[in-house]
Amino acid sequence: MTDKTDRLPILEQRRIEARVIKPIHDEMVAQVGREKADAILGAAIEKAAIAQGREFADEHGGATSLDGFADIQKHWTAGGALEIEPLERTDTTLHFNVTRCRYAETYKALGLGGIGHLLSCNRDGTFCTGYDPRITLERTQTIMSGASHCDFRYSFKPEAGGE
């Protein structure tokens, strides 16, 4: 099992990506309109999230589990990027609320609050597809969309196949 210790904290990675994506998104909006630009960006980010999930699974030799998934959350919370209120952790559930999201704060500060959900929030569930499709996310609200907290409810269904 390998854990890349030289990995850039995800918040910093997202900040760098956002600075590159902003002018590209602005140009797409000018040429094809907001709806189509958002759809293109959203599809590209989802594909990237799935690929990143596979990368993390490969680093763990493909031996994925909900415990392994919970362990890699440290990359997203590094440097206080997320403040989390743990709720439930079993072999098949990982439930928590995010009570502060510096990703949302960063996107708003960069003038990207309107697409922050595409740049970060939409990655959360699709990342699971690449990491282990037996893990699913149910979330009904996000700080990015103006809620007081994000409600992360991950479930693991071993009977769904995988590995």
Image: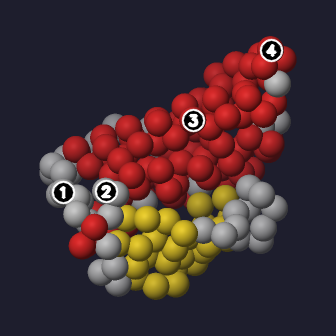
Left or right of 56? Residue 95 is right
In this rendering, the answer to whether 142 lies above or below 19 is: below
N-terminal of the two: label 4 or label 3? 4
Say which element carries label 1: loop
The residues bearing labels 2 and 1 have C-alpha atoms spaced at a distance of: 7 Å
Identify the amino acid type marked 1.
Answer: Glu
Horizontal relation, residue 130 to residue 127: left or right:
left
Mark with earlier residue (2, 4) = 4
**Side of 145 relative to 56 (left or right):** right
- Label 2 crowd bin: few (<14), some (14–19), many (20+), radius 10 Å: many
Name the residue that disc number 3 marks: 43
Whether the residues at callouts 3 and 2 have beta carbons within 8 Å, the answer is no
| Pointer 2 with pointer 1, Cβ within 8 A | yes
Q: Residue at x 73, y 27 (%)?
A: 37
In the rendered structure, which amino acid carries the disc numbered 2?
Answer: Asp
Task: Looking at the image, tell me whether mark 3 or mark 2 is earlier in sequence order.
Answer: 3
Disc marking residue 163: 1
